Amino acid sequence: MLRLLPGQRPLYLLIFLACATMLCIALYMQHQMELIPCALCITQRVFIIAVGLVALVAWIHHPKGWGNKAYAITGILLCAIGGAFSMRHLWLQSLPESMVPACGPSLGYLLDAFPLQEAISLLLKGDGNCAEEVWSLLGITIPGWTLIAFFGLTAGNLWQCFRPKVQSLEAQ
């Protein structure tokens, strides 16, 4: 069974390509389908990009031992944080209309009017714009699919972290 699973480098490349594909889909939805991303959508994109960049660097570096585990654990942590933002987004979408927070100001206004740390804090909480369900596939909205993607990326990184050591034929 272990032979069917990709090696260390190909799996890191696969993780990177999955992240690049998700980013291309997000950009297509934004620019071709004209779906304006909310603050939580942008935050989730940042974490998809970060997971992809870690995988790309790991693919280039081709680490052994603890180096491989360090890249994988970093990927897992980034997936966990990104997944938490996806869950927050899904929670906002599940609220009854009377409980949805008010829509906030634009990103540009927040960055101009507030100190950076406060603006980021406000963005990460989400607002009424984040509660709007603008697209779904098979009854799952964009943050739901993103959460599924984070689970898949986590699984790939977990495999990298706990990959069994392959013994050479000479050692047997």
Image: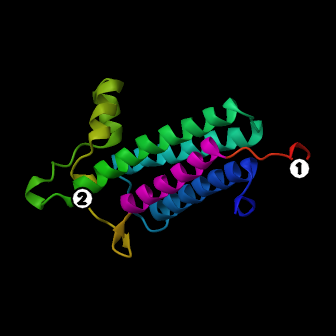
Give x and y (percent) for residue 26: 49, 59
Give x and y (percent) for residue 103: 20, 49
Identify residue type, mark 1. Answer: Leu
Magenta region, main secondary structure = helix
Residue drawn at (37%, 58%) of the image: 143
Give x and y (percent) for residue 34: 42, 64
- In the picture of the structure, the residue carrying the numbered disc 1 is 169
**As rendered, which of 169 and 109 lies closer to the eye?**
169
Element at label 2: helix
Report the quarter where the N terminus lies.
Answer: bottom right
- Span shown in magenta: 142-163
Tag nearer the camera, 1 or 2: 1
Element at label 1: helix
**As rendered, which of 114 and 23 lies closer to the eye?**
23
**Left or right, residue 80 beside residue 163:** left
Instruction: Please identify the quarter of the rendering in which residue 160 is found.
Output: top right
**Left or right, residue 50 beside residue 1:** left
- In the picture of the structure, the residue carrying the numbered disc 2 is 93
**As rendered, which of 4 and 112 lies closer to the eye?**
4
Identify residue type, mark 2. Answer: Gln
In the current view of this chain or complex, which residue is farthest to the left?
Answer: 98
Residue drawn at (48%, 61%) of the image: 31
Q: How is the image coloured?
A: rainbow
Label 1 and label 2: CA atoms lie apart by 54 Å
